[in-house]
Image (cartoon, grey):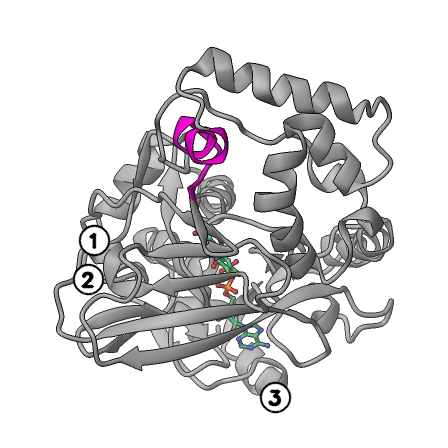
Amino acid sequence: TKPFDYLIVGAGLWGCVFAHQAVKHGKKTLVVDRRGHIGGNTYCENVEGINVHKYGAHIFHTNDKPIWDFVNSFVEFNRYTNSPIANFKGELYNLPFNMNTFYSLWKVKTPEEARAKIAEQVRQADITDPQNLEEQAISLVGTDIYHKLIKGYTEKQWGRKATELPSFIIKRLPVRFTYDNNYFNDKYQGIPIGGYNKLSEGLLEGSEVRLGTDYFANRKELEALAETVVYTGKIDEYFDFRFGSLEYRSLRFEHQLLDQENFQGNAVVNYTEAEVPYTRIIEHKHFEFGTQPKTVVTYEYPQEWTQGAEPYYPINDTRNDEVFRKYKELAENESNVIFGGRLAEYRYYDMHQVIGSALKRTKVLFQS
Ligand code: FAD
């Protein structure tokens, strides 16, 4: 018999949750990650007492009480509420689109006036069958919101003109007729007090962890150690890209430590004009109401993805979905390997979804 029941490839949330549930059921687990840290993209680096979200801002939100209780059993979450600000050519607007936004745009004060303004712009645009993202957005919220708050940001995110993007990217645009800047509609949201690492550390208690360890570079030796492989890396890489690469959108993060207490007064400020090359600036201390004398900010630049760059957002268009379907078929026939997580399933998962997915899988496996 082999020393471990499971070799878990990837110490991101999916792998961590799997490891925790396996250990809970008396299994021996070895977790490897090619990065030098656990937590995957939720990893935080402590700089001057500030938890810096190294792979982009992570705000936990869920409607699922058992998942909320689960994460809170490892680390207490604070009451942070995501309420981003949009900066368009120096003018500030509240997000998501709500009465505060409409007041700034048009000085309207009642929901009725705001509804009338949007309806009037939608009517004037007279778009019945939207052919692209621009037409779709305008047909939903009118020209002002589209031009000031959607167009530039979306074009930067996707690296393409809104008129060249398919309309299905935007199915609906949440518009709220209350003075409520809370970005999420979920019942529960917050940030782990002391950062996300406490969550992944708690989940990995009882597991052996090897960092800086690439599965593919050590495959034979690692597989000899465990009965079953749990793989949370890229699915195309697992199968040696035999059907071609799955495509992603990438990001470049520029972190700066500033010798001032408070740079922008909010954790998230979006830059919604096309001329500013970054999409947002994150000021990390505000996630935890920090009072440190210095501050750390991160500029987020969307990037074309090339092989070897960090894969952030899957591009679920027809071509990629078709390629993924072929890999998925192979994965289903791979014995002694369990595939899970955002990279192996080639889909965008929020943290609560990734946790839910791993809990569901382990529930079936361990029947509890
Ligand atoms: P990952 O965290 O990517 O973990 C996979 C791990 O596998 C990585 O650490 C990788 O190094 C390792 N690995 C891969 N291949 C190998 C190999 N061959 N050998 C060894 N190790 C390997 N969610 C929210 O709920 N709220 C948010 O606000 C939010 N913001 C986000 C912002 C950005 C910019 C991004 C990209 C995502 C955001 N998410 C957010 C989503 C969140 O990051 C994911 O749900 C979660 O991290 C997915 O966990 P995972 O374990 O599937 O993947």
Q: Position of residue 11 (x, y in %)?
A: 44, 68
Q: Residues within 10 Å of mark 3 (few under 14, many from 20)?
A: few
- 282, 23: nearer the viewer: 282
Q: Quadrant of residue 203?
A: bottom left
Which corner quadrant holds the C terminus?
top left
* Residue drawn at (75%, 64%) of the image: 247
Q: Which mark is residue 217?
A: 3
- Which one is earlier in the sequence, the residue at label 2 or at label 3? 2
Q: Is residue 95 magenta?
A: yes
Q: Which mark is residue 194?
A: 2
Residue of label 1: 75
Q: Of the residues shown, which amino acid type is indicated by label 1?
A: Val
**From the Cβ of disc 2, is ligand 1 less than 8 Å away?**
no
| Mark 3 residue's CB less than 8 Å from ligand 1 | yes
Q: Looking at the image, is 95 positioned above or below residue 240?
A: above
**Tags 2 and 1 in contact by the CB under 8 Å rule?**
yes
Of residues 63 and 283, which is closer to you in this image?
Answer: 283
Q: Look at the image and give the residue range highlighted in magenta.
A: 93-106
3 or 1: tag closer to the N-terminus: 1
The amino acid at mark 3 is: Ala
From the image, state whether disc 2 or disc 3 is nearer to you. 2
* Real-space Cα separation, disc 3 to disc 1, in angstroms: 34 Å
